[in-house]
Image (cartoon, rainbow, N blue to C red):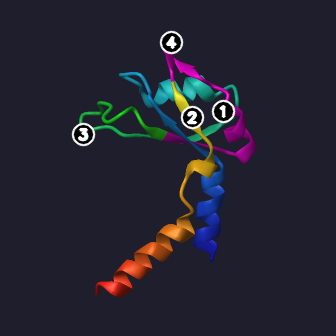
Amino acid sequence: MRLYQEAVAVRNKTIFVSNLPRPTKIQDLIDLLKDVGKVVQVRLLIDCEGNQIGDGDGDVEFTSAEEAEKALKKKFLHDQGISLLSSEGFPDPRKDLMELMILLWKYP
């Protein structure tokens, strides 16, 4: 139960970002969002050389859910429109765990 509560708490403080311009670095996101709150962690999809891969996706964790909510108002990075989604767009970690348990039970 504790692990689930921690996962939900982190999810509520985290936003999903996409359509990031190339090349976007972690510091670029910190600089963009630092006026809405303290950025705890940034995760970007990158290759082994540190280059952005995929559609420019990642997530940003703040110290509070309120800061994450404020960050959703940001719309541009390096003059390119970006997409930010609230934690409601994230899957419920309990549901993922239940689906995994069902799969393991069905296919040992």
Q: Residues within 10 Å of mark 1 (few under 14, many from 20)?
A: many
Q: Amino acid at mark 1?
A: Ala
Q: Nearer the viewer, mark 3 or mark 2?
A: 2
Q: In which quadrant will I find the N terminus?
A: bottom right
Percent of width and height locating residue 24: 41, 25
Please tell me whether residue 79 belongs to the stretch shown in magenta: yes
* Stretch in magenta: 59-81
Disc 3 to disc 1, C-alpha distance: 29 Å
The C terminus is located in which quarter? bottom left
Q: Report helix, strand or loop for mark 2.
A: strand
Give the mark nearest the N terminus, 4 or 2: 4
Q: Secondary structure at mark 1?
A: helix
Secondary structure type for disc 4: loop
Residue that numbered label 1 is attached to: 71
- Of callouts 3 and 1, the N-terminal one: 3
Asked if 58 appears above or below 108 in the picture, the reply is above
Q: Is residue 80 left or right of residue 14?
A: left
**Whether residue 42 is visible:** no
Camera-side mark, 3 or 4: 4
Q: Is residue 77 visible?
A: yes
Q: Which residue is mark 3?
A: 48
What is the C-alpha distance between the residues marked 3 and 4?
27 Å
Q: Amino acid at mark 2?
A: Leu
For label 2, the residue is 84
Q: According to the image, label 4 marks what residue? A: 79
Badge 2: how crowded within 10 Å, few (<14), some, or many (20+)?
Answer: many
The answer to which of 73 and 63 lies nearer the viewer is 73
Which amino acid does the dot numbered 4 rest on?
Asp
